[in-house]
Image: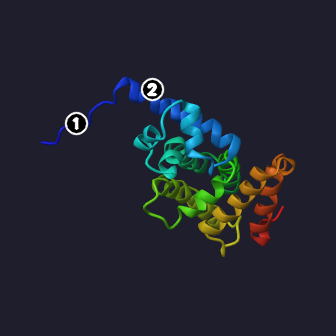
């Protein structure tokens, strides 16, 4: 009979929580490639403590973002049930782009997980991408989106919008407009606005 996992000591749990809190702030300030040493220093723990809790940058990002990705996947199902396909897809893509733009360079990390099944981000990111691909197929089946677009292409385009808006404060305020341009380009000829 397998023994249940041990609960974390309270000081270890505090360290982990503090690392996540500081990492969120540092990633928002400096981007997804921020120094892990800086995160540990600002959390007032040693680098070894950071690596004990999060052995890789992806493990840290997964702890920060995994539940957001899970929420996006759940939101896709809710939107599909409650809205017409194009509206569901558009609403979901706006939420996805906002999340991807939250940390500078996160879009690049998300694209890197596509083929890296060893990345801790891969599973939650794949589930989120799959949910978006289902919304895309629904919009294609409804004749709203051209049929020659696949989920990977859509994911890449929206990540590009998130990347540019995450790198340029002057463009950040135009994120929704840029997404509209992408969606207009993806629209089936019969459904163009």
Does 191 sit above or below residue 172? below
Label 2 or label 1, whichever comes before in sequence order: 1
> Which residue is nearer to you in this view: 183 or 162?
162
> Which residue is nearer to you in this view: 114 or 30?
30
Q: Is residue 135 visible?
A: no
Q: Image quadrant of residue 186?
A: bottom right
Q: Residue at x 52, y 55 (%)?
A: 125
What residue occupies the far right of the structure in this picture?
Answer: 170
Q: Position of residue 118 (x, y in %)?
A: 43, 61
Question: Closer to us: mark 2 or mark 1?
Answer: 2
Q: Which residue is mark 1?
A: 4
Mark 1, Cα crowd under 10 Å, few <14 / some 14-19 / many 20+, is: few
Left or right of residue 130: residue 157: right
Dot 1: what SS? Answer: loop
Q: Image quadrant of residue 138?
A: bottom right
Q: Position of residue 191 (x, y in %)?
A: 78, 65
What residue occupies the far left of the structure in this picture?
Answer: 1
Q: Residue at x 49, y 53 (%)?
A: 121
Q: Quadrant of the C terminus?
A: bottom right
Q: Residue at x 12, y 42 (%)?
A: 1
Does 184 sit above or below residue 75? below
Q: CA distance from mark 2 to mark 1?
A: 21 Å
Which circle marks residue 14 in the picture? Answer: 2
What residue occupies the far bottom of the structure in this picture?
Answer: 148
* Tag 2 near tag 1, CB within 8 Å: no
Question: What's the image's color scheme?
Answer: rainbow
Dot 2: what SS? Answer: helix
């Amino acid at each position: 009979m397998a023994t249940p996992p041990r609960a974390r000591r309270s000081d270890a749990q505090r360290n982990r929580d503090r690392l996540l809190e500081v990492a969120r702030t540092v990633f928002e300030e400096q981007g997804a490639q921020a120094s892990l040493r800086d995160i540990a220093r600002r959390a007032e723990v040693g680098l070894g403590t950071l690596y004990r809790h999060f052995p890789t940058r992806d493990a840290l990002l997964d702890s920060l973002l995994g539940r957001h990705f899970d929420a996006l996947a759940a939101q896709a199902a809710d939107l599909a049930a409650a809205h017409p396909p194009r509206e569901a897809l558009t609403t979901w893509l706006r939420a996805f782009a906002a999340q991807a733009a939250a940390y500078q360079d996160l879009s690049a990390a998300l694209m890197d997980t596509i083929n890296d099944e060893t990345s801790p981000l891969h599973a939650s990111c794949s589930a989120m991408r799959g949910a978006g691909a289902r919304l895309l197929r629904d919009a294609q089946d409804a004749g709203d989106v051209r049929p020659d677009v696949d989920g990977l292409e859509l994911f890449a385009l929206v990540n590009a919008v998130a990347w540019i808006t995450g790198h340029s404060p002057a463009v950040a305020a135009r994120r929704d407009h840029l997404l509209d341009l992408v969606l207009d380009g993806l629209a089936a000829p019969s459904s163009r606005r």
